[in-house]
């Protein structure tokens, strides 16, 4: 790891605390699974979502790239990675529609340029200070993984 790198998960540093949340009628569970986060979900249908959230305060540099490794088995759903500011009111996200994880795994590059403002009183701009990271899935059809 290079100087200035921000480590969301390493497996070597102990299990970080992740919280799981889900829309009404859906279920989510997030727990350490060796050197990875095990995120299980069952989405109920229209407008359903499940989130694994970790409080993690850090400042983003002007230029950055984040890497996400995903593997598993799940029906296609929208994969989202969200950066929430320290106030909890402003959210930026990266989304991939119709994502179905490969059993062998996939490494995904999340670039600053592909991050979009989602909602909040900031009404745009770029995140500077992050207070939490969320990994989410959303679907209008039932999905589990």
Image: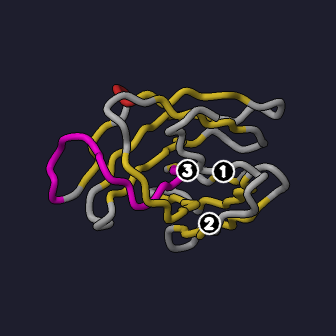
Q: Distance between the residues labelled 3 and 1?
A: 19 Å
Q: Residue at x 52, y 41 (%)?
A: 78
Q: Distance between the residues labelled 3 and 2?
A: 15 Å
Residues in magenta, as a range: 121-138
Q: In this view, does 74 lie to the left or right of 45?
A: right
For residue 64, which quarter of the picture? top left
Q: Could you say where residue 13 lies in the image, as x and y percent from the top left?
A: 73, 57
Residue 71 is inside the magenta segment:
no
Q: Which residue is drawn at 52% across and 49% down?
A: 139
Asked whether 98 or 80 is in front, the reply is: 80
Q: Is residue 99 left or right of residue 85?
A: right
Q: Mark 1 points at which residue?
A: 9
For residue 53, which quarter of the picture? bottom right
Q: Which mark is residue 18?
A: 2
Asked whether 73 or 35 is in front, the reply is: 35
Q: Mark 3 points at which residue?
A: 137
Q: Earlier in the sequence, mark 3 or mark 2?
A: 2
Q: Which of marks 3 and 1 is in front?
A: 1
Local crowd at mark 3 within 10 Å, few (<14), some, or many (≥20)? many
Local crowd at mark 1 within 10 Å, few (<14), some, or many (≥20)? some
Q: Residue at the front extreme?
A: 3
Q: Could you say where residue 50 lies in the image, as x and y percent from the top left?
A: 56, 60
Q: Do the residues labelled 2 and 1 touch (CB within 8 Å)?
A: no
Q: Could you say where residue 131 lies in the image, as x and y percent from the top left?
A: 40, 61
Element under disc 3 = strand
Q: Residue at x 70, y 54 (%)?
A: 144
Q: Which of marks 3 and 1 is nearer the N terminus?
A: 1
Residue 128 is inside the magenta segment:
yes
Q: Which of marks 2 and 1 is nearer the N terminus?
A: 1
Q: Is residue 112 left or right of residue 110?
A: left
């Amino acid at each position: 790891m290079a100087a200035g790198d921000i480590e969301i998960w390493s497996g070597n540093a102990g299990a970080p605390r992740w919280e799981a949340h889900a829309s009404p009628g859906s279920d989510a569970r997030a727990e350490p699974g060796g050197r990875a986060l095990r995120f299980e979900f069952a989405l109920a249908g229209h407008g359903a979502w499940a989130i694994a959230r970790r409080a993690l305060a850090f400042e983003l540099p002007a230029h950055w790239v984040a890497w996400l490794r995903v593997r598993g088995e799940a029906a296609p759903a929208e994969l989202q990675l969200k950066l929430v500011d320290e106030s909890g009111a402003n959210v930026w996200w990266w989304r991939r529609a119709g994502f179905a994880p490969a059993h062998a795994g996939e490494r995904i590059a999340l670039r600053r340029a592909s991050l979009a403002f989602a909602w909040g009183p900031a009404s745009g701009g770029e995140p500077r200070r992050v207070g939490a990271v969320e990994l989410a899935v959303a679907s209008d059809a039932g999905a589990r993984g």
